[in-house]
Image (cartoon, coloured by chain):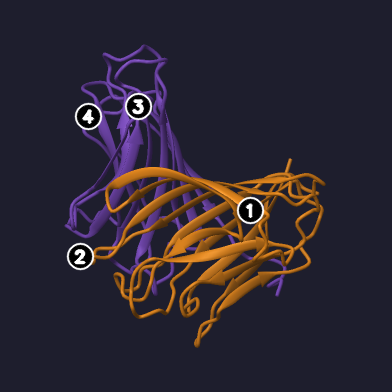
Amino acid sequence: MPKGMQAIYTQTVGAGGTTGVVFNNIPQTYTDLLVMISARDSNAAGNALAAGMFFNGAGGTTLYSNLVTRNLNSSSNSFAATNFGNMYSYVNGNGTTSNTFSLTTHYIPNYTLTSFKQIITDTVVEGNVAGLDSMNFTIASLFRGNTPVTSITFSAAGNGFMQHSTFTLYGISR
Amino acid sequence: MTMHFIESQNGTGSSGTIVFNNIPQTFTHLQIRGIARSVGIGSQLYTRLNSDGGSNYATHHMYTDGSGSVVSGSGGAPTTVNLIGSIPASTDLANLYCSFIVDIADYTNTNKNKVTKSILSLDANGGSVQQLWTASSVWMNTAAVTSVTIVANASFATLSNIQLYGIVSNPIATGA
């Protein structure tokens, strides 16, 4: 396997949107994975919305936990959650500044190991609409599953990911 | 190979501006990486896209100095620059440079305003100059990005170096 970063899969949401995106059959030949997302939710009520992420179909279980620092509308704090049902990032809702999509990276090191997985997430939602959220979250997540990551699922918390949202999976080899 | 080197520039000691012009439109995302120090006063680091100095950016940032407090703020609504963070002054610890990474997603996509996120590291072995920044910005313009200007309030020291990379997303399949 050549060293460096290689795009494995990409999905661009078409007209009509989608409630979820899945990367199946992830090759087990890399060392780390990186997911890059640029997304917007069609929920017209507007604000920033969560987008869930889980591995190997294990959503809704209690296998996830997270530690968060955030800047939400120029106010910062941190918090943690245990026994959570998924990992997450945020996306622009359809009431936020038009044509503006969130930017998220999920870094998943050593994804083929038969041990717990530690994930680093950096997610930003920007905009210029008074009364609606702008945010920058940095999240440490733990997946307490001992199997290699073979699939990743992204689910929209609102009405669904809008057209032009993009999800790309990269493999990183050392 | 997915991540490609495009260009590198060094500080000159007499200018607080580094510009990457004529950016190839053949990649999907851009990443800017660099180290920087000022030859004068303590300075903050900004970017502008396509030389747009108008009030067309919305920015938010958060930083800590290790004291236990976190400072957060915004760059006005809207503002004229995308703030990244602080760079050390000539009077700060010798040989001290900050390091930073800026991501610009889908920079050629004319359906999207251009969103950036950044992280800047300035550990100084203690002292008031040290800070760790995360920041984000939207340039409220759907035009493709053809140039990126990195700006400091004072001139960049000559060992400052900033590189531009392009990231492609031409994968094997969708994985669906």
Which residue is at a point 33% across and 44% down the rendered structure image? A76
Query: Which chain is the one coloured purple?
Result: B
Tell me the subunit letter for badge 4: B
Which residue is at a point 24% across and 29% down the rendered structure image? B43
Is circle 2 on the same chain as circle 3? no
Residue B160's quadrant in the figure? top left
Tell me the distance, in whole angstroms, between the alpha carbons under discs 1 and 4: 46 Å
Which residue corresponds to mark 4? B154
Say which element carries label 1. Answer: strand
Say which element carries label 3. Answer: loop
Amino acid type assigned to the residue bearing label 2 in the image? Ala
Which is nearer the N-term, disc 2 or disc 1? 1
Q: Is there any visible trace of residue B26 in the rendered image? A: no
Q: Which mark is residue B8?
A: none
Tell me the distance, in whole angstroms, between the alpha carbons under discs 1 and 3: 30 Å
How crowded is the residue under tag 4: few (<14 C-alpha within 10 Å), some, or many (20+)?
many
Residue A60 image point, x, y percent: 64, 66
Give the number of the mark in front: 1 or 4: 1
Which residue corresponds to mark 3? B65
Is circle 3 on the same chain as circle 4? yes
Which residue is at a point 68% across and 54% down the rendered structure image? A63
Query: Which chain is the one coloured orange?
Result: A
Q: Which mark is residue A130?
A: 2
Tell me the subunit letter for badge 1: A
Taking B6 as reference, is B20 left or right?
left
Task: Give B13 or A18, whichever is nearer the viewer.
Answer: A18
**Do the residues under discs 3 and 4 have CB atoms within 8 angstroms?**
no
Taking B28 as reference, is A98 left or right?
left
Residue A129 image point, x, y percent: 23, 67
Tell me the subunit letter for badge 2: A
Task: Give B50 or A161, whichever is nearer the viewer.
Answer: A161
